[in-house]
Amino acid sequence: MTAQQPNQPVEKIVHHGLRLDHDASRGRYSLWHGSTFVGFLGYHEEDGIATIQHTIVNEEFGRRGYARALVTLVLDKFRGEGLKIIPECSYVQDYLRRYPEYNDMVVAAN
């Protein structure tokens, strides 16, 4: 690869006071900064595989690292639960190219 790697690894979560809420019945993890709703990640889980469908961050929080924080928190949670993932979401696909340490969780879609 010819891509330049930064001298220091990029901090994946740059915000403090973030909270992740899980609504299993809706297949959604919501990200909150304090009492403010930031966005959500939608998924569907079946047979130990979470298909990540979309990552939505409110426009006023765009380009500020919130989507990256949301995906990091959810992937770390999925890893802790032993889940594999199918990344249908284009943001998550880009994230996995940037942070290959999660690629061992990816399974091919059927």
Image: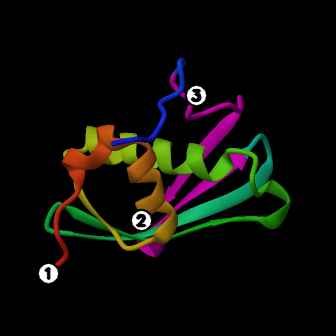
Residue 3 x/y as whole percent: 44, 41
Give the residue number, with chain letter if any, for mark 2: 24
Give the residue number, with chain letter if any, for mark 3: 11
Observer-nearest residue: 24 or 103? 103
Residue drawn at the location 39% of the way across and 51% of the way down: 96
Three-letter code, disc 1: Asn
Q: Are marks 1 and 2 in contact (CB under 8 Å)?
A: no
Q: Nearer the viewer, mark 2 or mark 3?
A: 3
Q: Is residue 31 magenta?
A: yes
Measured Cα–Cα span from mark 3 to mark 1? 33 Å
Observer-nearest residue: 34 or 15? 15
Q: Nearer the viewer, mark 1 or mark 2?
A: 1
Tell which circle, 2 or 3, labels the residue nearer the N-terminal end.
3
The segment highlighted magenta reads 9-32
Residue 75 x/y as whole percent: 38, 47
Measured Cα–Cα span from mark 2 to mark 3? 28 Å
Residue 45 x/y as whole percent: 28, 68
Residue drawn at the location 76% of the way across and 57% of the way down: 62
Give the residue number, with chain letter if any, for mark 1: 110
* Within-10-Å neighbours for mark 2: few <14, some 14–19, many 20+: few
Q: Residue furthest front?
A: 2
Q: Are marks 3 and 1 in contact (CB under 8 Å)?
A: no
83 shown above or below 88: above
Which of the 4 quarters of the picture holds residue 77? top left
Three-letter code, disc 3: Glu
100 shown above or below 12: below
Q: Quadrant of the C terminus?
A: bottom left
